[in-house]
Amino acid sequence: MILIAEEGERALAEQYFPGQDILVTGVGALNILRSLRGLPLDTPLINIGYVGSANYRIGAMVEVGEVRLCHPNVTYKEPSYHLRGGLAEEYHIPVEHKDVPIFTSVDFVLQSKEHDCVFDMELAFIVGMGFTDVRALKIVSDNLSLHEYHDLTNGVE
């Protein structure tokens, strides 16, 4: 099953995964929990959508390798999750960056000291629910700018 956060990401999902079932979850943690709570945990999931990055090129396709929460003001011990790779090769999708770390936040990230990574608002919550077969491709929509994100995606304001 293909997971997208917003209807505006449907064209991406259909371009790269034609004929696959698509579920629009909504943006953020509570929408993820609500949308996925009834799925069996062994359901294969592919999350595709837009992300921010401090330094990756806008429009760059990345394959996610590691998932963590974003909490820039405190440090505490918590798990990070490693995703099974090979999605780009399996579906013949050109990516600029492989095995990229993603930081999931509960709000739009507007600044960060982290580089060579991307930021979203859903993926850590998906894997944190216990799903065992999750993979992700993300397209950089902005360089930590809500204005750039909105111009490219026409997404949340």
Image (cartoon, grey):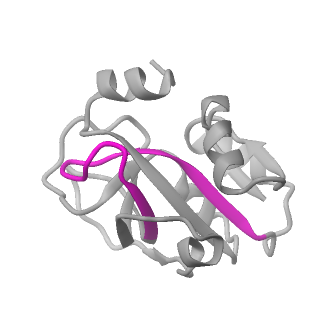
Name the spot of residue 103 as percent of width and height, x first.
37, 57
Q: Is residue 85 found left or right of 80 in the rendered image? A: right
Give above or below for 100 relative to 50.
Answer: below
**Residue nearer the viewer, 14 or 31:** 14
**Residue nearer the viewer, 143 or 95:** 95
- Identified at 55% across, 80% down, the residue is 86
Quadrant of residue 70 in the image?
bottom left
Name the spot of residue 21 as percent of width and height, x first.
84, 52
How many numbered dots are placed on residues in this image?
0
Quadrant of residue 28 in the image?
top right
Give above or below for 114 relative to 151.
Answer: below
Name the spot of residue 9 as percent of width and height, x first.
61, 37
- Identified at 43% across, 74% down, the residue is 80
Quadrant of residue 47 in the image?
bottom right
The quadrant of the picture occupied by the C terminus is: top left
Q: Is residue 54 magenta?
A: yes
Part of the protein shown in magenta: 44-64
- Identified at 22% across, 51% down, the residue is 72
Q: Is residue 113 magenta?
A: no
The quadrant of the picture occupied by the N terminus is: bottom right
**Residue nearer the viewer, 10 or 120:** 10
Name the spot of residue 84 as percent of width and height, x first.
56, 81
Q: Looking at this view, name the residue that lies furthest to the left.
A: 113
**Residue nearer the viewer, 30 or 13:** 13
- Identified at 85% across, 60% down, the residue is 39
Give above or below for 141 relative to 39.
Answer: above
Q: Is residue 92 found left or right of 82 in the rendered image? A: right
